[in-house]
Image (spheres, rainbow, N blue to C red):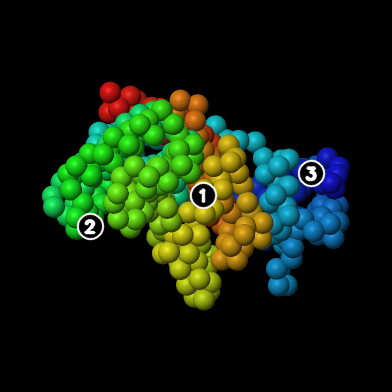
């Protein structure tokens, strides 16, 4: 790891702070005047040249000023940044979003996406609860009509789901009741991970029904516990891309918008993010080429000590990381609190 002396650290932090604020190349005179660095402009210029040689600064076109490289932003986040403290008014505003009455968990998730995009002015992403590790508290299959049944599922986290399944010809109420009892016997008190392997064979051995219907039941259970792809993620503030100078190029903007529209790649990204309490990927650290000019900052939310999902933002590499970290901390606390309260109330 490269070690910088105090002088270079101070100058690098000043350049990054100003570039985050203004988005313009930073010159030595600006640093000298604004940041109280008691060095001559010539000395600061020399230090900036050294930082450029080390890969921390870049000189765009013929401008006399420098801008931070992606390497500089990574160094800034890891070593120089102090997480900002939100004002009491800002913190209260975030809480007020969650104070509004919400009917179900999906409302909470969608509200979170809106809170994040409104407060950070970036594109927000919220992964719907992933419950593979949650214990199944209740599972029931009920026939609705001749051609439809509903799968009801409740986990120990309090989350509930109901999924409608098509019933093939020849499946009777007796078959449905036998299947429902079997599901209860095999899944109650277990996580889906524990029960999934043996469940399919067990159904085949005990209930003589169409194999396609068994597959539909398995898919319904899997989808209930872990929404996949674009159904598993909520986005907010996609209109904020209009303000990103990084996407003034029509081609770049189109490529990025295609990622937002399909959502599948973002779902995979946010699924991986559940492994980290906080995560920051900057520019070309991102796996998706469409995000090479962007940064992704994520955090996880929990209920009862269990990680249920992740949430975060996509924004320019020059985003105000300090403020974004603080906002994610406040939103995460509010989200976990409201989900815990919501699930306790609705899970009884």
Above-or-below relation of 191 to 28: above
Where's residue 212, x and y in %? 33, 58
Which label lies toward us, 2 or 1?
Answer: 2
Of the pair 25 and 201, the residue shown nearer to us: 201
Judging by the rendered image, the residue that carries numbered circle 1 is 270
User: In whole angstroms, how far apart are the C-alphas of marks 2 and 3?
Assistant: 69 Å
User: In the image, is residue 165 above or below residue 275?
Assistant: below
Question: Depth check: 345 or 15 in front?
Answer: 345
Name of the residue lying farthest toward the bottom: 251
Give x and y (percent) for residue 167. Answer: 22, 54
Please give the name of the residue rendered at 22% of the width and 39% of the height, measured from the top-left corner: 177
The one nearer the camera, 165 or 74, is: 165
Q: What label does residue 117 carry, if any? A: none
Q: Quadrant of the C terminus?
A: top left
Report the mark closest to the observer, 3 or 1.
Answer: 1
**For the point 44% across and 31% down, which residue is it?**
190
140 left or right of 230 in image: left
Q: Are marks 2 and 3 in contact (CB under 8 Å)?
A: no
Asked if the residue at tag 1 contacts the one at tag 3, i.e. Cβ–Cβ closer than 8 Å, the answer is no
Q: Which residue is mark 3?
A: 9
Residue picked out by circle 2: 168
The local secondary structure at tag 1 comes to helix
Q: Earlier in the sequence, mark 2 or mark 3?
A: 3
Q: Earlier in the sequence, mark 3 or mark 1?
A: 3
Compute the Cα span from label 2 to label 1.
36 Å
Q: Which element carries disc 2, helix, strand or loop?
A: loop
Q: Could you tell me which residue is drawn at 54 percent across and 42 percent down?
A: 274
């Amino acid at each position: 790891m490269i070690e910088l002396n105090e002088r270079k650290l101070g100058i690098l932090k000043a350049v990054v702070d100003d570039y985050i604020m203004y988005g313009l190349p930073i010159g030595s005179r600006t640093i000298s005047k604004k940041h109280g660095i008691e060095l001559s402009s010539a000395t600061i210029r020399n230090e900036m040249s050294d930082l450029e040689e080390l890969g921390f600064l870049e000189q765009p076109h013929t401008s006399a000023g420098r801008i931070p490289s992606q390497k500089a932003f990574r160094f800034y986040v890891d070593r120089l940044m102090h997480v900002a403290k939100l004002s009491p008014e800002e913190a209260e505003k975030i809480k007020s979003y969650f104070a509004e009455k919400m009917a179900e968990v999906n409302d909470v998730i969608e509200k979170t996406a809106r809170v994040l995009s409104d407060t950070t002015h970036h594109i927000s992403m919220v992964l719907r609860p992933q419950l593979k590790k949650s214990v199944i508290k209740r599972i029931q299959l009920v026939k609705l009509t001749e051609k439809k049944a509903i799968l009801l599922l409740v986990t120990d986290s309090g989350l509930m789901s109901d999924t409608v399944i098509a019933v093939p010809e020849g499946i009777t109420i007796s078959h449905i009741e036998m299947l429902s009892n079997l599901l209860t016997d095999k899944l109650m008190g277990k996580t889906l991970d524990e029960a999934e392997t043996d469940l399919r064979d067990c159904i085949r051995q005990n209930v003589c029904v169409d194999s396609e219907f068994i597959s539909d039941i398995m898919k319904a259970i899997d989808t209930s516990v872990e929404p996949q792809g674009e159904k598993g993620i909520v986005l907010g503030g996609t209109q904020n891309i209009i303000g990103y100078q990084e996407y003034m190029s029509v081609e770049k903007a189109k490529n990025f918008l295609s990622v937002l529209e399909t959502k599948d790649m973002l779902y995979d990204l946010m699924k991986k993010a559940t492994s980290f309490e906080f995560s920051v990927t900057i520019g070309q650290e991102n796996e998706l080429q469409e995000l090479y000019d962007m940064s992704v900052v994520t955090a996880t939310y929990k209920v009862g000590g269990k990680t249920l999902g992740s949430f975060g933002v996509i924004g320019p590499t020059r985003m105000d990381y300090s403020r974004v970290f603080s906002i994610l901390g406040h939103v995460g606390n509010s989200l976990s609190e409201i989900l815990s309260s919501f699930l306790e109330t609705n899970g009884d």
